[in-house]
Image (cartoon, rainbow, N blue to C red):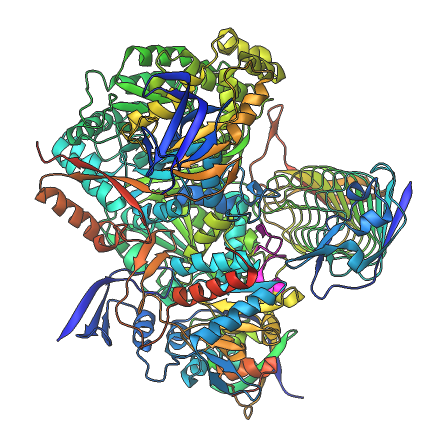
Amino acid sequence: MTKNITLNLISGRTIQQGVAIESGKEKPSYRTACGIIEMDNADLKALGAWKNTNVRVTSDHGSVIVKAIEATQGPHPGVAFIPMGPWANSIVDPNTYSTGMPTFKGTPVKIEVTINEPILLGIELVQIQCGVKVG
Amino acid sequence: MSEYIIKNGSVFDPVQGIKGDKKDIAIKDGKIADKVSSAAKVIDASGKTVMAGAVEIHAHIAGPKVNLGRIYRPEDKLFSCTPTKGMERMGGGASIPTTFKTGYEYAKMGYTTAMEAAMPPMFAKHVHEEIRDTPIIDEGAFPVFGNNWFVLEYLKNHEIENTAAYIAWLLRVTKGYAVKVVNPGGTEAWAWGLNCLSVNDPVPYFDITPAEIVKGLIEANEYLGLPHSVHIHPNNLGNPGCYETTLDTLRLAEGMKAKNKFGRESVMHLTHTQFHSYKGTNWGDFESGAKEITDYVNQNKNITIDTGNVTLDETTTMTADGPFEHHLTGLNHLKWANCDVELETCAGVVPYIYSPNISVCAIQWAIGLEIPLMMKDPMRCYITTDHPNAGPFTRYPRVIKWLMSKKARDTQINAFKHKDKVLSQTSIGSLDKELSLYELAQMTRAGPAKTLGLGHMCGGLKPGMDADVAVYNFNPDKPVANPDDIETAFSRCAHVFKSGVEVVKHGEIVGTGHKRTLWVNVKVNDNPQVMRDINEKFIKYYSMTQANYEALGHHFVPNPYALEVDATHV
Amino acid sequence: MTKTITDVICPFCGTLCDDIEVVVSDDGKQLLEVYNACVIGSEKFLHSQAKDRVTKPRMRQDDGTWKDVSYDEAADYTAQMLAKAKKPLMYGWSSTNCEAQSVGNEIAEISRACCDNTAAVCHGTTLIAVQDIGLPTCTLGEVKNRADRIIFWGCNPAHAHPRHMSRYSIFPRGFFTGKGQMSRKMIVIDPRVTDTAKMADVHLQIEQGKDYELLNALRVAFKGEWLPDVVAGIPKEKIREAADMMKSGRFGIIFFGMGVTQSLSKNHNIDIAIAVTKDLNEYTKFSIMPMRGHYNVTGSGEVFAWQFGFPYSIDLTRGFARYNPGDTSSIDLLVRGEVDAMFTIGSDPGAHFPISAVKPIANMPSVCIDPHLTPTSGVSKLHVPVAFNGVETGGNCYRMDNVPIDCRKVVEPPAGMLTDEQFLVMVRDRLKKLKGAA
Amino acid sequence: METVTITMKNPPALYLEADNVTPDVFAGKTAAQIAELHVHEGNTTSTLGKYFEVSGNAGATVADTKIVVKGDVKKVKYLGMKMSAGEMVIEGSADQYVGAWMTGGKLLAKGNVEAFAATAMRGGELIVEGNAGNYLGAAYRGDWRGMSSGKILVKGNAGSDIGMYMTGGEIVVNGNVDVHVMTHAEGGKTVIKGNTKSKLGGQLVDGTIIVFGNIETMMPGYKPNGEVELEVDGVKALFSHYIGDMGERHKKKKGAIVYGNLYKKI
């Protein structure tokens, strides 16, 4: 059985995300900025993952491949961070509690190492999940 | 443009002294004319009342605090939104209607000009965007000056010329209409959580008093010769005993004379007088000070007032008197919004329910009616609800009913839970006066137009004036069977013309007219010091650049009408 | 020769910096350099110059390829889609100007659509809270001139509003704050040690999702009442210390962001933060301000409010305006299957909605009006590229503190490209004909 | 009492707004007249009869009218909205706003109801045999006048934000509830027989919350105040008593501060 770890996922802005969305969401730089998960060193260790390893992040709401990197704004053991974007939104809790606002912060996720699975580009990630043919 | 002739109506026009005579009113090229050709469309007004379009001198109908009211009160619109209908866009809102509804409602009641009473200069673009989206009625907006850092610094040293140059600059960049003063000094004090409750309370840091601010602004206003006088909401609004502060404020105008080419005679306009006419020391012994205030105003011809009538509705209070709104939320515990505006002003918003079952509210209602009934010169007293503070402007027909019918007032008094208290704390029960239609026309047309410096344009039916005309389904020759008929008649006009265009027919919107934004363009001598001060304040203290401050262009003021003032003579 | 344009407004975030300088070519067609902007703002200006930019409307084909169409054809498709739909959703509006928003509202009114802006996934819950309890706030210049207590709650301006701290909140020297940063105490509440938190005098590293409890504890601390030993992971002594620090200032402000609007309790987090602010006004002067994201999301709320009476999540289907997030809000409408056509402008729900709210978009008639290629354009049937607002066209916008600032046009758009407003006017006029309106 | 039965025969493609389905609107009408009443699907308006089979005539008065709603009405909103008297039975599950703004009468939903049921209820009785959604018995957005009177019984679970801005009346939930109970309330009582999560009684000015099961996280504004024996719904038990919200304003009665009360069964 693959080793996995359960963390509390939050998403949010980063300056790299801001630059990337303005330079083009079709570009690999968007993936570099947002197709990542920031994890605390202790959690990386517990998972047995090296820095910059591809991982699968799974919640009750979906699953996505991103690159695990060391927390840039830590320490925050128990908390994982994916910059806002389609990667995070593949797995966040859409429950709005009838307020209109999904629960973008505070989704329990399971993380497991998947070194060989590719991280998709932003637009194709959404297209594939929506069943739209990638042009 | 179409010609019209409104035939056989009972005409009430204080400008020409017409008191209900059967007269024909001719409309040509957007103006009232002596005569029109035989091609003119005939409007039969027999058995109807004809007046000039009404002029609203003080209402909060456009801008940031009004919209904050809309944003934060969805419940004000619950089950009250109306669909697109004919020419009308969707509308909604009871105490703070949407811009479209605001324009339609005013027009349907025969109003053709309205003044937004408090424009935060930094938000001028917002005010103008809303004015643009308020159909039909001509509108102007009063920028607030009473807590502005430039004004405080200049007037600390009594620099009238510099104050005047700054006023001229600000009116130009904000496309403003007049000098508005709200709780002078008190709103700046509120930026530190403090207030100025008397005209002599020092303003923190600025080393000036409200009295000095008000006097200095009147001097600067007359130095420039602006169309409107200084328009003031004094310190200490809404507190028992506040009438003394009001009298202190009114006395600041003593000996001052109006200087302008617009025919205005007053130097100070006291707004929503009802809120400033309270005697007593607390809410328990609260009583009317309407007699004291109107006695003073009756004797001093350089002062005009508006009423601020309480309409006994659930409404939304909003004012640049920030500390007052904070005080109010402490009393009724309803949601409190406040916005302090850098270097300039502040605004607060709190919902309020004027319940007929609460004695204070009922007394406020009585005071609002005592004031116009006690005023000897209707040309110096104008009907307002300080919309939406004392009630929504859509209640004007009801206020008119109360003013025109003692019977209607008595019916309301008898319906109060604390009727005895109303009768003991006010003199409303002993006032028999019933307003005539001529007096109504003075209080809602000729009077406010004159005080706004618009007497040459609107508020009357003299040939050459703008063809703003309202025809009411009200026959002055017949006795009023039921006072409610007055309210019905003034709620929905038979016809309304705005600048010669028919905008309302049988109570429905049939045209959107030729809406204008009124503003005052003052030429002053070059004043390098003031220009340098403005430049410095933007560099050091404003959060936006000077180049981005001005409300410029078609988007904000698509159809401007500037009243030109030349103050370079001095 | 090049030309320098000053006082340019940055169309990225709600900070709406208006001191940008842009160097353009003599013919006004090329944007060469950008000064004073943050790295994101610079990128926004410079990316408009990208050579690979899409300049023509395109229809997505079944095989995933795109076919260029004219603006006329695009407007026809859009108008017909809106005319046919029983309940179209018109979403976005936050990255366009108030002029375009106004035309959009006319379209929504004629087609009886649901209209919503990006507050839906940003500060919509703030608006709900403001509706419940009010909002004591101020303009950003007040903060610069007076504030000596700055609280950043669940926001990270170092990343999301990069020039906020230097222009308004932490560093500037104002009228009563001559010592700049030295005059101010900074408190940050965040579950991570963010780059903003690293600068703070006090950082409360709160347990995620427990903001409501911590804010409640602060209110209790103001009153000196009993507190449990630890609240939201913070010891009570530290809570009392923070409470005292807030009370002891002369002018304080709480800035808050999506850390609270999007976490459990949502509107209630803001509601009680506003209650905290209201409480503090019994001791000193305090304000609170949402860190609005898109540069004109605030403007969209303003225009909606004065035209329809509500700031977002408006349902016009019955011919009059209704509002109730949870029912009329975009995410709920999409996830619940309430709408049958999707019109997106000036935003990217494809990237910023949970995937379960994006999937329905791909399965209904859809139009995406956006200068960029985005996940939304990628799943929409029609993509209409337009000029960059704030770069290639001007127009009024509202800063996070509701201050209106008129954006500037600095360069010409590529030949033949329309602005949002121009395209919307085409759609509106067609729709009027289809619906037989005047 | 006369009974009108409406049975869904053509479910809507989107959602249906049926605010005319109330005893108030039906009263005095024949089945044929009722079938002509308006319903709305998106921006289209059509008749009740297009979607429902209508049988039986209404009573002469509202109080004499009973409505039975049959078939799949999971995508029908506003059933029983603003009803003031009479009776209504929804045989299955319904969408949002069931009994919203109701002022009287008896409304029974045998299945589940979605969010905003009994919004700003002023009287009458709502019984939900299944689960209720969020904002049960809560105020409309921006309004400080929530449920003021009447009774709500949910036999299953309820969602978040129940009883927000409640000022009176009673809500009983036999199952569990989600976050936020009686936020901002100034009166009224909520009884939860199952478990609760967190944020109970936040910003509560006055009112009573009684919990039989767990409270995952207690609000820090609730101060322990000993133990009391209470009788709730005929069950006598020992409860821990808390007063709060200590951070919120409270009214005074005879000089003493009146706090809200939270009881948790021991």
Residue B521 placement, left or right of C309: left
For the point 54% across and 22% down, the residue is B486
Which residue is nearer to you in this view: C334 or C84? C84
Is residue B104 inside the magenta stretch? no
Q: Nearer the viewer, residue D104 or C62?
A: C62
Write down the quadrant of residue C346 in the picture: bottom left
Q: Residue furthest front?
A: B38
Residue C172 image position (x, y, % from top left): 25, 55
> Compared with residue C214, is residue C249 higher up or lower down, i.e. above or below?
above
| Magenta region, main secondary structure | loop
Q: Position of residue D249 (x, y in %)?
A: 55, 36
Q: Position of residue A118 (x, y in %)?
A: 53, 90
The quadrant where residue A91 appears? bottom right
Vertical placement of C338 versus D68: above or below? Answer: below
Is C438 rendered above or below residue B230?
below
Q: Quadrant of residue D110?
A: bottom right
Which residue occupies the extreme bottom position in the image? A116
Residue C194 left/right relative to B34? right
What residue sits 53% from the left and 12% below the top? B406
Of D24 and B518, the residue lying toward us = B518
The range drawn in magenta is: C315-333
Res. B192 visible in picture:
no
Along the line of sight, which residue is nearer the eye, C59 or D194? C59
Asked whether residue C331 is drawn in magenta, I would say yes
Side of D208 where B207 appears, left or right: left
